[in-house]
Image (cartoon, grey):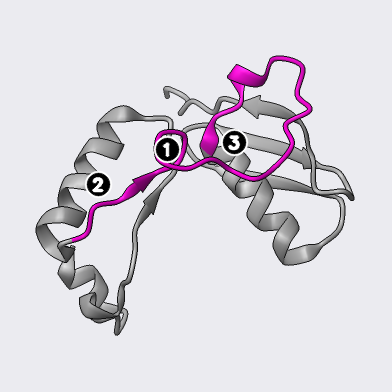
Amino acid sequence: MLKFFDVRGIRSGDIDDVIIASVVPQVMFAINNAMKKYLGKVALIVGEDCSVPIKNNYRIKKEVGVDRLVNAFCAHKTYKRPLIVVDFGTAITFDVVSKEGEYEGVKSLRCEASQG
């Protein structure tokens, strides 16, 4: 991990804090342990240690992962207008944010590699 920082010209001492927003518990555990080992930092876990300051208007709120709320919040803070956030992760997700900065909804497309 430190090599990753070195290649990009980032010194580990320049990192003040670590925040993890993930819906994959195994990833959170591994990343948090790496932060402790390599940076001497205990990460804040979004959803456990802190919350995302965005109003969630989605019909079934528990279906929206904190990772998607963080994306929506940061996108609105950056662009300050209504938008659609597209995330290319395990699934391609589309998240709608209103002009007021409220989370409106989601759409997911699962992509699977074709055989043959």
Residue furthest bottom in the image: 9
Magenta span of residues: 41-66
The Cα–Cα distance between marks 1 and 3, rounded to whole angstroms, is 15 Å
Which disc, if any, is residue 31? 2
Of the two numbered discs 3 and 2 on the same chain, state the one appearing first in sequence: 2
Q: Residue at x 23, y 37 (%)?
A: 29
Q: Which residue is mark 3?
A: 92
Question: Between residues 9 and 102, which one lies in front from this camera angle?
Answer: 102
Q: Residue at x 67, y 50 (%)?
A: 73
Placement of the N terminus among the 4 image quadrants: bottom left
Q: Residue at x 29, y 84 (%)?
A: 9
Quarter of the view holding residue 41: bottom left
Q: Position of residue 13 (x, y in %)?
A: 22, 79
Mark 1 touches mark 2? (CB < 8 Å): yes
Main SS class of the magenta portion in the image: loop
In the rendered view, tell whether residue 4 sits above or below residue 61: below
The Cα–Cα distance between marks 1 and 2, rounded to whole angstroms, is 10 Å
Q: Position of residue 70 (x, y in %)?
A: 58, 46
Residue furthest top in the image: 60
